[in-house]
Image (cartoon, rainbow, N blue to C red):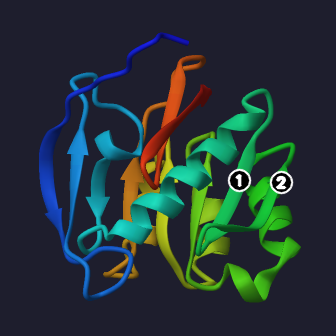
Amino acid sequence: FPGWVGGTWTKKSGLRYGENPHQAAALYVTDGGGGIAGAEQLHGKEMSYNNYIDGDAALRAAHDHAGLPTVAIIKHANPCGIAVGESIEAAYDRAHACDPVSAYGGIVATNRPVTAAMATALNDTFSEVVVAPDFEPDALEILKEKKNRRLLKVATPAPGGVETRPVSGGLLVQQR
């Protein structure tokens, strides 16, 4: 790790509020964009601070198993279910079965395009955000039936690199 670390970010947008309603918040991006901050929002209301935090955790968890179709469901920074399957529909069914009560209102991320079959199953439970590399056209129409649900199209995260996390008085850096 280098002896000095620095970086620059550009403000992309203000957010409705921060982690709590009394906190102001904004989203900043790096020049390279990408990741959850660079997602293309296809549908739904504005993203919140907590949506970005949980969306990033779900995205990263889903892509930890890049070799197999994987679905991760995160709520309040806690995994409600992470599963692999022969198909993305099977992975979703397994992930949801881990804790269907906690999955209500969670963030769902996949490492494969969302199919119509998965979208139909997903519509049976309220979810705040669905993050995926793509959505089949029929799946998109099914998911858009819920007007407030946010649908994010996100490129596969680049492997390697480092990640940072601020802590009081400092910054933690680790390999991704």
Which label was assigned to residue 71?
1
Q: Nearer the viewer, residue 77 or 133?
A: 77
67 lies above or below 154: above
**To which quarter of the image does residue 21 belong?**
bottom left
- How many numbered marks, from 0 up? 2
> Are there few (<14), some (14-19), or many (20+) residues within 10 Å of tag 2?
many
User: For this view, does 79 lie left or right of residue 174?
Assistant: right
Q: Nearer the viewer, residue 124 or 53?
A: 53
Residue 24 in view here: yes
**To which quarter of the image does residue 102 belong?**
bottom right
Q: Identify the amino acid type marked 1.
A: Val
Task: Evaluate if marks 2 and 1 touch, with contact meaning CB atoms under 8 Å apart.
Answer: yes
**To which quarter of the image does residue 101 belong?**
bottom right
Q: Secondary structure at mark 1?
A: strand
Q: Residue at the location (64% across, 85% down)?
A: 104
Residue 114 in view here: no
Q: Residue at the location (38% across, 53% down)?
A: 152
Location of mark 2 (residue)? 83
44 lies above or below 28: below
